[in-house]
């Protein structure tokens, strides 16, 4: 199959991104566990402005989404595009430039958040000049990807690459338009939009960061690594075509479901709800396509923990993409909005789908670009710790979210509100504690993964040393 | 045989072989939804029906907003009351689009770890706010909010106030030249740090009925409309200096009482008129 020998591919750019992704995955989940424990035990804010929840929360979201997820997407894009196009990356220099700029941008973001320097837009907190660094990196990354496809030695462009292309275009749009701001100085800028319009643009960004960065990109990862890992072709080519185009079209519309019953126009709310419900079809099509690809290789689940990550990731993807449309229905949203249910939903996607398919892809790539993992047993331990952690986290947030929603709207027989808001806060404590434990387990899982990576790299280095010794002897 | 049965009616093969076509299709397709939902609200009057009373922030409130954003308050507190009975009981009248028309950025929030703040103004005393920000559990034992003791000791950094107002004017918030020129006097006057010298000027500027933005668009309220009086006092109880606490409490006390809601007026279903009237 391979028309090019492996030496022709540039794996150095993949390797650095794999290492950064795993390190930052550990850092990001640690930040998450820290802010989760602040909500359970507020004393952990330490009366210190730099560590207080409000300033620290973007540290968690940006690190897990853009550092862990981002470097995973950089690694996989560079890996997949070379291997499916049978050609070396168009420009290694540009790839390195993109990697360094992404890292510099993220480090700047993480240094400015504790100082309270923020645009005040969720998942887009970094100030305008950091936005520019990240945007330049993204454009270089996309350009390199497209030019590599242009140089391909294959006739067709593989389906995984379509999803990456969709992500690259859409993330460029939403990042630039949501980031439009008028700077006051280096530490402050005002959004170009106000009120209703700002809300619309923000959730067009917010939901499509999920829809394209965390879904289209990660589906590209799924479409390459699942068939490759189990050694079977994609179950249905037609389904992948339908899946792709319908996801590209439908996802863009659904941001308005974050604003149900707010002051945005009614028609946008209904449109957001309707499109969200429609979105279940392509989402489940993609999930089934991935799962059915594994059909016939189920016996490998007994021995292969990486495949376990893949199947559970797809199961969570199916569950989250059922839950999402459900929560987008206005009458359900009336209960769920503003509660922890939303947080639970996000994390069933993030910890279940995104992290698990990412972890699977990372383990797979390490094996191919260095050597087999140091310990398969530790991958298995990671799998179980991660899964238990994710389930604890999600169930805690479901329970607290629904409880919150019901407590806020409870009236007694005399027509008075039954609970004060403070009552609902007190009721959350056990769930917040449980969520912290779940998050801590996920963090420990990443620690195990990093240890396994370090050991694998040491072994690879030792083997390399032996080979040179043999060669020179 | 099944191959023919489900044959695609579009020639997808040519899309997969041609990078240019694939890129153009994707680039256009992903743009549709956003354009259809985001652009029309700028042109439809009923997207943000006019209502009397919503004015730009005073310099002190504007600095308070900046602190609200800096400390990430919006991550745990919403400012968007939905039209439900329980929310009306708990927080007050549902939020109108026009109430956040000058909010660059909007601070509706997405999560209520703490309660909604859209109509917090005048609900509690300044002293309650100061004590609550100093140590929330001292007034609400169940609270999980961090202590914000540093707000009281940090003297407000006003080096950016003028630039902020100028930036907002560029974005069509109706500050006039006089408002910007007098930012410092107004800021001190509102925090009562000037022995009452500038209060009348401040009130004349921010309790007016005519607002003109840089593009010359006039927002004229009826003569009989009396704008909500400004809160002018030492918010943190200490008139000797202007602290971050002064600014934040001034901002919080301004939340949600600029519009004078009248009994029996439907602020929700009017799709045509401006302002909302029966």
Image (cartoon, rainbow, N blue to C red):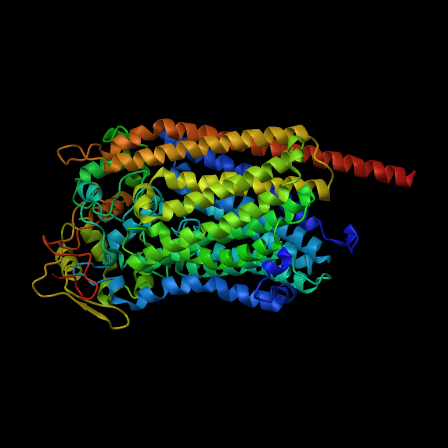
Q: Is residue A3 above or below residue B10?
A: above
- Give the residue at x 49% y 64%: B29
Q: Position of residue A407 (x, y in %)?
A: 26, 34
Is there any visible trace of residue B146 in the rendered image?
Answer: no
Q: Is residue A213 above or below residue A377?
A: below
Question: Residue most toward the left?
Answer: B224
Q: Position of residue B145 (x, y in %)?
A: 32, 35
Residue nearest the viewer, comparing A387 with B219: A387
Question: Residue most toward the front?
Answer: B1
Residue nearest the viewer, comparing A150 with A240: A240
Q: Position of residue A379 (x, y in %)?
A: 63, 32
- Give the residue at x 30% y 69%: B43
Query: Horizontal placement of B122 versus A239: left or right?
Result: left
Location of the C terminus of chain A by quadrant is: top right
Query: Horizontal placement of A392 versus A156: left or right?
Result: left
Q: Position of residue B82 (x, y in %)?
A: 25, 48
Number of marks present in the image shown: 0
- Give the residue at x 31% y 56%: B161
Query: Horizontal placement of B236 versus A135: left or right?
Result: left
Question: Residue most toward the right?
Answer: A473
Is there any visible trace of residue A375 in the rendered image?
Answer: yes
Query: Horizontal placement of B176 versus A47: left or right?
Result: left
Residue A397's image quarter? Answer: top left
Q: Is residue A200 above or below residue A227?
A: below
């Amino acid at each position: 199959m391979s028309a090019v020998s492996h030496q022709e591919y540039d794996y150095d750019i993949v390797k650095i991104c794999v290492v950064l992704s795993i390190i930052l995955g550990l850092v990001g989940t640690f930040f998450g566990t820290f802010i989760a424990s602040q909500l359970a035990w507020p004393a952990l804010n330490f009366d210190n402005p730099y560590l207080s929840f409000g300033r620290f929360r973007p540290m968690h979201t940006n690190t897990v989404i853009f550092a862990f997820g981002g470097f995973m997407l950089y690694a996989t894009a560079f890996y997949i595009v070379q291997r499916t196009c049978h050609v070396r990356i168009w420009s290694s220099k540009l790839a390195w430039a993109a990697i360094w700029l992404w890292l510099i941008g993220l480090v700047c973001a993480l240094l400015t958040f504790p100082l309270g320097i923020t645009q005040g837009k969720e998942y887009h907190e970094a100030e305008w000049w950091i936005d520019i660094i990240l945007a330049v990196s993204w454009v270089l990354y996309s350009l390199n990807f497209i030019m590599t496809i242009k140089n391909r030695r294959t006739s067709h462009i593989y389906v995984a690459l379509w999803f990456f292309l969709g992500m690259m275009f859409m993330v460029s749009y939403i990042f630039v338009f949501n980031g439009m701001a008028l700077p006051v100085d280096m530490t402050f800028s005002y959004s170009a939009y106000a009120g209703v319009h700002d809300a619309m643009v923000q959730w067009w960004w917010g939901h499509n960061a999920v829809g394209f960065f965390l879904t289209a990109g990660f589906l590209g990862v799924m479409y390459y690594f699942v068939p490759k890992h189990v050694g079977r072709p994609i179950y249905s080519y037609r389904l992948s075509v339908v899946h792709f185009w319908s996801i590209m079209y439908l996802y863009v519309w659904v941001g308005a479901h974050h604003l149900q019953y707010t002051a945005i126009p009614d028609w946008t709310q209904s449109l957001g709800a309707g499109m969200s419900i429609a979105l279940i079809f392509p989402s489940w099509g993609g999930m089934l396509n991935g799962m059915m690809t594994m059909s016939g290789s189920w016996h490998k689940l007994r021995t292969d923990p990486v495949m376990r990550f893949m199947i559970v990731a797809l199961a969570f993807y199916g569950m989250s993409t059922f839950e999402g449309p459900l929560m987008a229905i206005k009458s359900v949203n009336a209960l769920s909005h503003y509660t922890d249910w939303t947080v639970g939903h996000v994390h069933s996607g993030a910890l279940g789908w995104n992290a698990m398919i990412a972890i699977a892809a990372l383990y797979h790539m390490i094996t191919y670009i260095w050597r087999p993992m140091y310990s398969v047993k530790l991958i298995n331990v990671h799998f179980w710790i991660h899964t238990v952690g994710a389930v604890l986290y999600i169930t805690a947030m479901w329970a607290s979210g629904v409880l919150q929603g019901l407590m806020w709207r409870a009236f007694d027989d005399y027509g008075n509100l039954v609970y004060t808001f403070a009552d609902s806060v007190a009721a959350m404590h056990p769930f917040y504690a449980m969520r912290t434990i779940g998050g801590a387990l996920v963090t420990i899982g990443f620690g195990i993964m990093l240890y396994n990576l370090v050991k694998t790299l040491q072994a690879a280095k030792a083997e390399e040393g032996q080979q040179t010794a043999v060669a020179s002897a | 045989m099944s191959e023919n049965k489900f044959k695609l009616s579009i020639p997808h093969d040519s899309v997969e072989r041609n990078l240019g076509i694939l890129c153009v299709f994707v680039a256009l397709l992903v743009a549709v939804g956003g354009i259809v939902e985001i652009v029309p609200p700028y042109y439809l009057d009923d997207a943000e029906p006019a209502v009397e009373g919503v004015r730009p922030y005073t310099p002190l409130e504007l600095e308070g907003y900046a602190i609200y954003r800096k400390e990430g308050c919006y991550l745990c507190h919403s400012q968007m009351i939905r039209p439900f009975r329980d929310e009306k009981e708990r927080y007050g009248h549902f939020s109108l689009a026009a109430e956040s028309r000058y909010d660059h950025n909007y601070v509706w929030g997405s999560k209520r770890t703490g309660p909604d703040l859209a109509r917090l103004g005048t609900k509690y005393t300044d002293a309650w706010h100061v004590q609550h920000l100093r140590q929330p559990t001292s007034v609400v034992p169940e609270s999980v909010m961090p202590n914000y003791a540093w707000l009281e000791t940090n003297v407000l950094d006003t080096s950016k106030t003028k630039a902020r107002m100028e930036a907002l004017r560029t974005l069509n918030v109706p500050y006039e030249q006089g408002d910007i020129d007098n930012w410092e006097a107004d800021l001190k006057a509102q925090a009562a740090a000037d022995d009452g010298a500038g209060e009348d000027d401040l009130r004349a500027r921010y309790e007016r009925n005519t607002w003109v933005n840089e593009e010359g668009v006039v927002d004229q309220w009826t003569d009989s409309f009396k704008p909500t009086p400004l809160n002018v006092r030492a918010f943190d109880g200490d008139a000797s200096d202007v602290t971050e606490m002064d600014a934040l409490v001034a901002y919080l006390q301004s939340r949600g009482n600029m519009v004078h809601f009248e009994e029996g007026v439907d602020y929700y279903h009017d799709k045509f008129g401006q302002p909302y009237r029966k």
